[in-house]
Image (tube, grey):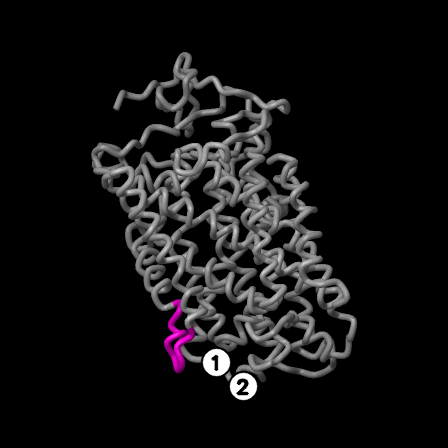
Amino acid sequence: MESPVESHDEKPGVSNTVAPDAHPEVAGGIVAHAVASNGNVLDEGLQRGLKGRHLQMIAFGGVVGASIWYGTGTAVASSGPLGALICFSIIGIAVFFVMQALGEMSTLLPIPGAFIEMSGRFVDPALAFALGWNYWYLWVCNLANDYNNVSIIFSLWTTSVPSYGWVLIAWAFYQGVSLMGVVVYGELEYWLSIWKLFCVLGGFLVAILINTGGIGGEYIGFRYWKTPGAFANGINGFGQTFLLAAVYYCGTEMLALTAAESRNPARDLPKAIKQTFWRILIIFIGLVFFAGLLVPSDSDELLSAKTKTGKSPWTIALVQAGWPGAGSLVNVVMLTAQFSSINSAIYVASRSLVTLAKTGRAPKIFGKTTKNGTPVNAILISNFLGLLALLNITAGAGKVFTYLIDISGSATFIAWAFIGVTHVRFRKAWVLQGNSVADLPYKAMLFPYGTYFVVGLNIFLVVISGYGTFIGKFDAVNFVFNYIVLVIFVVLYVFWKVVKKTKWVKLEDMDLQSGRRDYTHLDVDMSGVEEKGKRPWWIEAKRWVMG
């Protein structure tokens, strides 16, 4: 590999190294990029229009969707209040180390496709093919589940409109919004995510008031942890809740994908990773904890595979406390939450498909973008397949919710496991090629132990995810939905390896240069970048909450 060209316009703390073969136009060590009509950089067809505040809220907005309000009830029903809390805590620890791995790699190499492309560069090109398609259909399933959630939300208000009617209305609306471009997407996600954050905090307050008798006049405390109990459904319940937790935490890793459309990933990505993880962890653990206090795990009003509709624990508790119209208020909160989570699902699915197309792993037509960097074809096909939600016409919303959770959860375990494998290989190559760990702009905590934990835990979880199908009478349908993703992943890997005759990448041959680019010469807005500790505490608090 040729030695990289070094820029003479160096700035402290920012790498100015570019690979001369990464782009066709290189002059004086600086890549000449196309520019969108609004002045943002176009890098490999995608617009770098996301600001630091956008990055800090996008993953939060995409992860905290409407279904978390009744999905926490599903978790409690599956494994009990304490069981659900344990499952979400363990997955939260795993996600922390996943984000540490991604932070280290994506801050150094903010490339389109992020860990998908890196898996091919640092492990095996066949892995990038399999992992890319795995991540794409993971988010297509998440999108379908979001549309299914819309029908569940509206079913509380009226059943005169069939479930598929709400799905089609939402599908048409979000198709239009998703084509507006990354700048509009970033702004929408930012403000909607702030609204969702305040809604969640309000949910915490309401739960405390109900539990202590402030609303309803009856003290509940930990009554439901005693009767019907802190745990439910044994190891099968844990398996289902692990899948559910994985699906809800899934999306934190999308920050690595947004690095390719960030104005200044070296500055913004580490901050976004730290703040987003803690926001999401506190919110998920808090919601699961309070859901377990509000309703018993054996409540027949909670959403499960056996129900066509389901209520939020907050709705159930408020109605029991004497407010029969509470469901409408919770529904409004869920609808606004759904707006941004559908946006994020379309965004991630389409950008994953763009990467596959641009690297020759999918039809080239899906890699085409408009002059302002919007991947129209990838958006259209990804959103079209979100109509898998129409399965709820015959199976019922509850059953479809369970099926899509099974697929998305297993695909998430696979993605996280191979993010860990890719990170281990990257770090070994970085040191072997004569680089110092101290030179990395972001260093993963507790490496290699944290990364090994991620790999081991996720392999274990994907294997036991369908444990319940073997208990009692064999359930062939649930077995397929739990393990079909694993089979497809192996088939995709073997197919590409045989067809393309790919080889395991040697450590000494890994490309650690392409993608290490500098955009500071384009006068990216650096305002607001102050040395930590020099701002008043209330400004620091505001930025932690709002970005």
Q: Which numbered dot is residue 228?
A: 2
Residue 453: x %, y % from top left: 32, 58
Residue at mark 1 to residue at mark 2: CA–CA distance: 8 Å
Verify whether residue 469 appears in magenta.
yes
Q: Helix or strand or loop: what does disc 1 sit on?
A: loop
Q: Is residue 50 visible?
A: no
Residue 347: x %, y % from top left: 56, 43
Q: Quadrant of residue 543?
A: top right
Q: Which numbered dot is residue 232?
A: 1
Q: Which residues are magenta?
A: 465-475
Verify whether residue 510 appears in magenta.
no
| Image quadrant containing the C terminus | top right
Q: Quadrant of residue 486?
A: bottom left
Q: Helix or strand or loop: what does disc 2 sit on?
A: loop
Q: Is residue 108 visible?
A: yes
Main SS, magenta residues:
loop
| Image quadrant containing the N terminus | top left
Whether pointer 1 and pointer 2 mark residues with C-beta atoms closer than 8 Å, the reply is yes
Q: Is residue 8 above or below residue 181?
A: above
| Left or right, 414 with reference to 375 | left
